[in-house]
Amino acid sequence: MTNPLLRDWTGPYELAPFAEIEDGHFAPAFDAALSAAQAEITAIADADAAPTFANTIEALEASGAALDKVLSVFFTLAGADSNPARQALQREFSPKLAAYSSWVSGNKALFARIETLWEARETLDLTPEQARVLMLTHRGFRRAGAALTGDADARMREVMARLAELGTAFTQNLLADEAAWQMELGEDDLGGLPDFLVRSARAVGAEKGLDCPVITLSRSLIVPFLQFSDRRDLRRRAFAAWAARGANGGETDNREIAAETLALRAERAELLGYDSFADFKLETEMAKTPQAVRDLLMQVWAPARAQALADADTLTQMMQADEVNGPLEPWDWRYYAEKRRQAEHDLDESEVKPYLQLDRMIEAAFACANRLFGLEFRALDVPLHHADCRAWEVTRGGDHVAVFIGDYFARGSKRSGAWCSAMRGQAKFPEVQAPVVINVCNFAKDDPALLSYDDARTLFHEFGHALHQMLSDVRYESVSGTSVARDFVELPSQLYEHWLEVPEVLAEFATHADTGAAMPQALLDKVLKAATFDMGFQTVEYLGSALVDLAFHEGAPPADPMARQADVLAHIGMPPAITMRHATPQFAHVFAGDGYSAGYYSYMWSEVMDADAFAAFEEAGGPFDAERATALERHILSRGGSADAEALYLAFRGQMPGPAALLKGRGLAA
């Protein structure tokens, strides 16, 4: 076979041979792998033998391996290094994959076999993990519409295919808007900008063939620009572009896509017999109901809003002292908050950043994993999907555990944000396979690359997801790693952020880029003391997005999502100088797919647990308590979705927490 995507990968650790893969390989490989997957499903569904767990459920677990292999490479590239050819392929593949998924779930013979096993489950002598996989398979088919017939069945297929097309279009429109905008800066435009930001902006300009600093809509550039620039007119211009992503009119406008998506989701839920899409989506989560979600969010909203309004008054006074008239605006908040932080905490981010080198923060994340779980990391020299990427072999006691890939730098071909995915998940069936895990971030490239404190926290967050993948120890890939309830999946990632705040970690790894000296104790103390600074703003902008997401998916879908967004924000009393963290036209969590639809709340649901879980370490022997680390791995990180999420947390902690630890951790309660 000349197509490298269809060959066995025999290189180091059976990694994808990226150096051999060309865009022209994807379409034929996809078609061949999709045909093979369809043949495997047909063979399972049409088997003469009576259904057993082995010939039905395990056969499904083993099916589609070739397709998974092709797609793992393709979607890595589509997200982290897109180009017009890959975008066209994504538009081509998306409806085909949706049709394939609908074909599988709509296969009546296959569902009949699964239903037979489900009805006989008490007599099958299954292990707890097998029983869980059977339950999840049966539930997944039912929720996909396997029990539908006639017109309802046909309509469900149409709905799912169209939703796939819309999700792809939403993502590509957002990427196009982000790539299209730039602001060239002259020497008179650099007032207030720290050296690290000017260097990063000059590097971007050089990449674009320009002899000047350039600000783009990459978060690693736009946020510090809003934070430091003395030029209010330029801050306003930059913020307007940032806020307008997906809402600029023309072919890349996402507002009609959002409206159609919400209407189709509501129809999908109605076809399946649910009152709303929120009811459908939350059935499988820890929260279970929209009301449980709202109860949590509103418990946090009141103290967060009160703090944000008090902060807004202070920032307004600072702005008026600068003889700037009028109300505090969204493009003013970060600028005056930074000035306030410098004044109240004597903390200047440009003073902190040289101590937060990317390479040293990677070392810090690895060192914490070593102390907690005994993992060791060895750099690898292997072909990867981009020259900026790097890889490590992960071992424990000399045994291979995983391959970890880091793709850390922003570029125009990469979608915004940060994420973790498994290019190959852990499993022991049909054969033992070790995971290949990738973290993708959007840090500003420089030499050396320096991070903000928020950037460093993002690095630890995504590495927490990676640990969930790497330490997985289950039989079936469908329940390995992060294959858990959406409002549980953020627990390991948000929990791992806490180790960045451990003083001894920063003392060892926060070393100056020029001198190599450790961060002075006085500066370290200020960094830790300021960790909850501006938390009213951060909490309010997040909760605004979460509450709008929930409202979108309850009841009748809004004909005009932007009007519905405005109504929700007015109802909760959104402070006028704070905007949603993700406004509707750029809310990729919710509209690029349905992963976080009616589920953006899950970060906070998980934070309730992560605050409580880290408290368990503090109550024991400290952040590196060996007994607690072992319990965390045994009961949560290694178990994936092989048991109910609440049961896993109870096994680790003994009780479910309330929001008190979260409020205290955010500095919103005494």
Image (cartoon, rainbow, N blue to C red):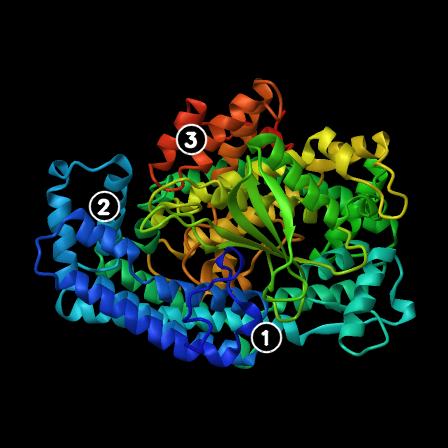
Q: Is residue 523 above or below residue 10?
A: above
Residue 168 locus on image (x, y percent): 45, 71
Residue 87 locus on image (x, y percent): 51, 76
Question: Which of the two discs, 2 and 1, sits closer to the camera?
Answer: 2
Tell me the distance, in whole angstroms, between the alpha carbons under discs 1 and 3: 43 Å
Residue type indicated by callout 3: His
Residue ID for mark 1: 176
**Few, some or many residues within 10 Å of mark 1 (<14, 14–19, 20+):** some
> Where's the C terminus, which quadrant?
top right
Residue ID for mark 3: 635
Residue 602 locus on image (x, y percent): 46, 44
How many discs appear?
Answer: 3
Residue 503 locus on image (x, y percent): 73, 29
Question: Which of the two discs, 1 and 3, sits closer to the camera?
Answer: 3
Residue type indicated by callout 1: Ala
* Secondary structure state at the residue bearing disc 3: helix
